[in-house]
Amino acid sequence: MTNIRNILQTLINNDIEFVIIGGVAAIALGSDYPTSDLDICYSRTTENLQRLSSVLLSLDAKLRNVPPDIPFTPDAPTLKSGLNFTFTTSLGALDILGEVGGIGFYNEVKKFSNEEIVFGLKCFVLNLDGLLLSKKFAGRKKDEPVIIELEAIKEMLQKKK
Amino acid sequence: METDEKKSAIQRAIEYGIDITLIESNMRLTPTQRLEKLQGMMELIEEMKKVRTRRYGNLIVSDQHSEYSPNANK
C-alpha cells in the first residue's frame, strides 16, 4: 500500500524539487476517484537527480511492470538517460515523470501548480487547468470520467467566486 | 433538447453518472483531509485483498507483476 504522507515527507526532507500530479493531485483538489500510486513530476537538474536517486535507493525502488530479474539501479545517470519511471518502493507505488504530456517539463508543470499544505507539508500540486490539460492530452478512455468530474469541480469553484 | 455544449459542466457530470454530492462533500474538506480519506480507502482495499487471499488463496494474479501486464514475458 502506498503511504502518501511518508513518501512526501521523505521527498521534502531530502529537498527534492517536485510537483504532485495525477490521481493524488486530482483528489487533493476534490476528485472522488481513488488511485493507488503517487505520481510526481521532478526537476531534471543534476543536483535534483542526485538527491532523487539517493531517495529512490533508500526506498529500495524497483521498476514496476518489469520482471524482477532485470537489473536496474536508479542512480543519477540512469535517471538522466530516462525520463518517466514507475517504481515499487518500500513506501508503495511511486511514479516519477520528467515530462507531463500536454504541459512539459518540471518548470512548465510548476507554472500550472499551486502551493498547498498537505499533511502539514508545503507541496506544489498540479492545478485543475494543468490536470485537465494532461488528462486530455493523454486521451485515455479511463480518464474520461475524471475529466468530466474535474470540469464540474472547476465550475463549482467558479460559481463560488 | 439542450445540446452538450449548452449544458453546464455540473449537468454533464450528473448525466454521466457522477455523484455530485460526493464531490460537494470533498470540497468541504481540506486537501489533507481529502488525502487522508484516500489513505483510509487504500488501507481498506489492502484489508480486502487479505480477505480475498485468505478465502481464495493466490488464485488471483499479483497486482504488481501481473502476467496480464502488456510488458509481461509470455
Image (tube, grey):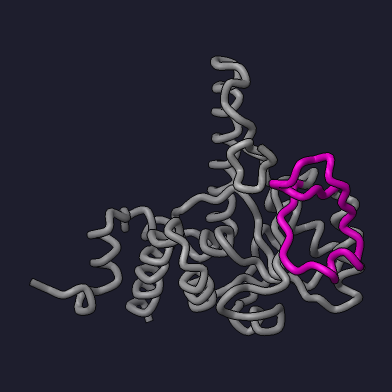
Q: Is residue B28 visible?
A: no
Q: Residue furthest left?
A: B1
Please give the name of the residue rendered at 72% of the width and 65% of the height, measured from the top-left corner.
Answer: A84
Residue nearer the viewer, B73 or A58: B73
Q: Is residue A152 left or right of residue A18?
A: left
Q: Is residue B46 visible?
A: yes
Residue B60 x %, y %? 57, 26
Please give the name of the residue rendered at 55% of the width and 35% of the height, measured from the top-left corner.
Answer: B45
Q: Is residue B57 left or right of residue A136?
A: right
Quadrant position of the N terminus of chain B in the picture: bottom left
Please give the name of the residue rendered at 50% of the width and 73% of the height, measured from the top-left corner.
Answer: A137
B31 in relation to A114, above or below: above
Residue A132 x %, y %? 47, 73
Quadrant of the rendered image containing residue B35: bottom right
A72 in relation to A16, above or below: above
Residue A70 x %, y %? 83, 45
Q: How many marks?
A: 0
Please give the name of the residue rendered at 61% of the width and 77% of the height, measured from the top-left corner.
Answer: A113
Q: Is residue A103 magenta?
A: no
Q: Is residue B54 left or right of residue A159?
A: right
Quadrant position of the C terminus of chain B in the picture: top right
Residue nearer the viewer, B71 or A122: B71
Quadrant of the rendered image containing residue B63: top right
Residue nearer the viewer, A125 or B53: B53
Residue nearer the viewer, B60 or B51: B60
Residue A5 x %, y %? 70, 53
Highlighted magenta segment, given as a residue range: A60-88
